[in-house]
Amino acid sequence: MSVRGNPWRIRGFVARRPRHCALTADGLPVDVTSQPDGGDWIEGRLKNLSREGFQLALPEPFPLGEEITFRLFDPESKYECMVRGTVRWSTEVAPGRHTIGCQSAEAIDWTILGELFLRRMLDDHGTGE
């Protein structure tokens, strides 16, 4: 959902480059929670990721300012990572389908990005939408 032909601008927020897109068109499966103890996870999809933020597709929104954690697990290699962030924008793309943009709580470690590229989970050739 781009604004004025710029795929990196969404409702006034600008995705910071480099934004690494999920290798699959529908995103990578993740579990998401807003509870610090990790309870009540919902299923979502990681659409893109940078060191400073990420975009998720979810069946329900989280409020702006909400602190969340997503967990990505690759069953093939058993690789798992967890990333925390704060919801900065949210939009309903269809009934029961929401996209949220989050600012990472801290810069995502280069090791995590490297692992996701090595496991062919991220790609640099997407639009960031």
Image (tube, grey):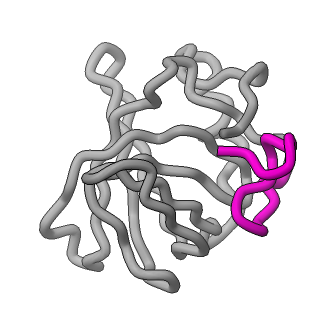
- In the figure, is residue 63 to the left or right of 59? right
Q: Residue at x 26, y 22 (%)?
A: 75
Please provide the residue range marked out in magenta: 1-16
In this rendering, is residue 4 above or below 46? below
Quadrant of the frame with the N terminus: top right
Query: In the depicted view, which residue is nearer to us: 10 or 28?
Result: 10
Residue at screen point 47% across, 41% down: 46
Q: Is residue 45 magenta?
A: no
Which percent across, then down, holds residue 93? 45, 50
Compared across the picture, whether 26 is left or right of 4 comes to left
Instruction: Determine the residue located farthest toward the bottom in the rendered image.
Output: 65
Q: Nearer the viewer, residue 64 or 81?
A: 64
Check the image and report above or below for 15 versus 17.
Answer: below
**Quadrant in the picture for the C terminus:** top right
Most frequent secondary structure within the magenta stretch:
loop
Instruction: Using residue 124 as the reference point, say whether residue 23 is left or right of it.
Output: left
Front-most of residues 43 and 10: 10
Q: Position of residue 52 (x, y in %)?
A: 73, 60
As drawn, is 99 to the left or to the right of 39? right
**Residue shown at 13%/66% (left/top)?**
40
Q: Quadrant of residue 11?
A: bottom right
Inspect the magenta stretch and tell me whether residue 14 lies in it.
yes
Residue at the image position 25 percent from the left and 52 percent from the top: 96
Residue 98 at what x, y percent from top left? 40, 55
Q: Nearer the viewer, residue 73 or 55?
A: 55
Q: Position of residue 18 (x, y in %)?
A: 84, 41
